[in-house]
């Protein structure tokens, strides 16, 4: 097996362990007032798993393979690094408000520092860039499509649930925040 493939698979597992660690680390650090998750975290995980399966499945073949694998591997690694920086910064900006489930916690407030000043979901943007980087590193255009499409479907669902809940809990403050910011891409979307 190619060393690049081993590295990609190893990073994928390490990133998964990072997210699990962050999930366990956050438990018990805040008091949950109300949950509005509606299983969205599991829907998201399912779509991410589908994206990984399809992306790595087609990536193991020559169908859709692009030449210059080293170039795409480096581009993918840069995207992963950029996504990690965005993801970690968004978690740090939220501090005790960071949760993996859609919940209202004690002293819940809208955070408008860092990237949250421009977009409402920088953590999700970071994750999407990570998934784009992982699939790009496979040097297969079909791998990119087969990763990003299901993952985007999962995040779109998750964002819809989360924003509906935030409007219910925070009312006009969140609606005003929505007017000042974009969902995922600063100044665009």
Image: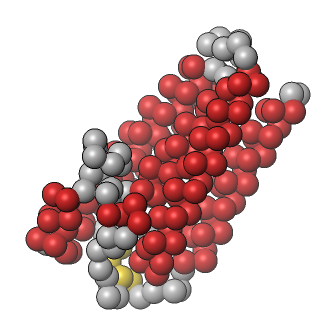
Position of 54 compared to 7: left or right? left
Instruction: Pick the residue in front: 121 or 89.
Output: 89
Quadrant of image for the C terminus: top left
- Give x and y (percent) for residue 110: 29, 74
Which picture quadrant has residue 57? top right
User: Looking at the picture, does residue 62 appear above or below residue 100?
Assistant: above
User: Looking at the picture, does residue 80 appear above or below residue 74?
Assistant: below
At horizontal 32% and vertical 88% (from top left) the residue drawn is 107
Which picture quadrant has residue 54? top right
Instruction: Pick the residue in front: 65 or 34.
Output: 65
Position of 126 compared to 38: left or right? right
Which picture quadrant has residue 103? bottom left
Position of 158 compared to 50: left or right? left
Q: Is residue 125 visible?
A: yes
- Give x and y (percent) for residue 81: 63, 48
- Give x and y (percent) for residue 43: 43, 50
User: Looking at the picture, does residue 49 appear above or below residue 115?
Assistant: above
Task: Kindly give the residue lying farthest to the left in the view shown.
Answer: 172
At horizontal 62% and vertical 45% (from top left) the residue drawn is 80
At horizontal 57% and vertical 19% (from top left) the residue drawn is 141
- Give x and y (percent) for residue 42: 47, 55
At horizontal 52% and vertical 50% (from top left) the residue drawn is 127
Q: Is residue 53 visible?
A: no
- Colour setup of the view: secondary structure
Position of 107 compared to 12: left or right? left
How many marks can you see?
A: 0
Quadrant of image for the N terminus: top right
């Amino acid at each position: 097996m190619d060393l690049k493939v081993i590295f990609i698979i190893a990073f994928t597992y390490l990133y998964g362990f990072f997210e699990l660690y962050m999930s366990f680390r956050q438990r018990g650090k805040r008091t949950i007032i109300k949950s509005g998750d509606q299983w969205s975290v599991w829907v998201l995980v399912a779509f991410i798993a589908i994206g990984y399966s399809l992306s790595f499945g087609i990536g193991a073949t020559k169908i859709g393979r692009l030449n210059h694998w080293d170039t795409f591997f480096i581009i993918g690694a840069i995207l992963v690094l950029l996504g990690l920086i965005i993801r970690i910064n968004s978690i740090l900006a939220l501090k005790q408000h960071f949760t993996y489930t859609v919940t209202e916690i004690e002293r819940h407030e809208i955070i408008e520092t860092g990237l949250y000043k421009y977009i409402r979901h920088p953590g999700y943007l970071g994750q999407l860039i990570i998934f784009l980087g992982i699939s790009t590193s496979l040097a297969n255009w079909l791998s990119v499509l087969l990763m990003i499409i299901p993952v985007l479907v999962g995040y779109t669902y998750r964002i819809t649930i989360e924003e509906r809940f935030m409007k219910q809990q925070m009312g006009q403050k969140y609606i005003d925040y929505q007017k000042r910011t974009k969902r995922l891409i600063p100044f665009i979307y």
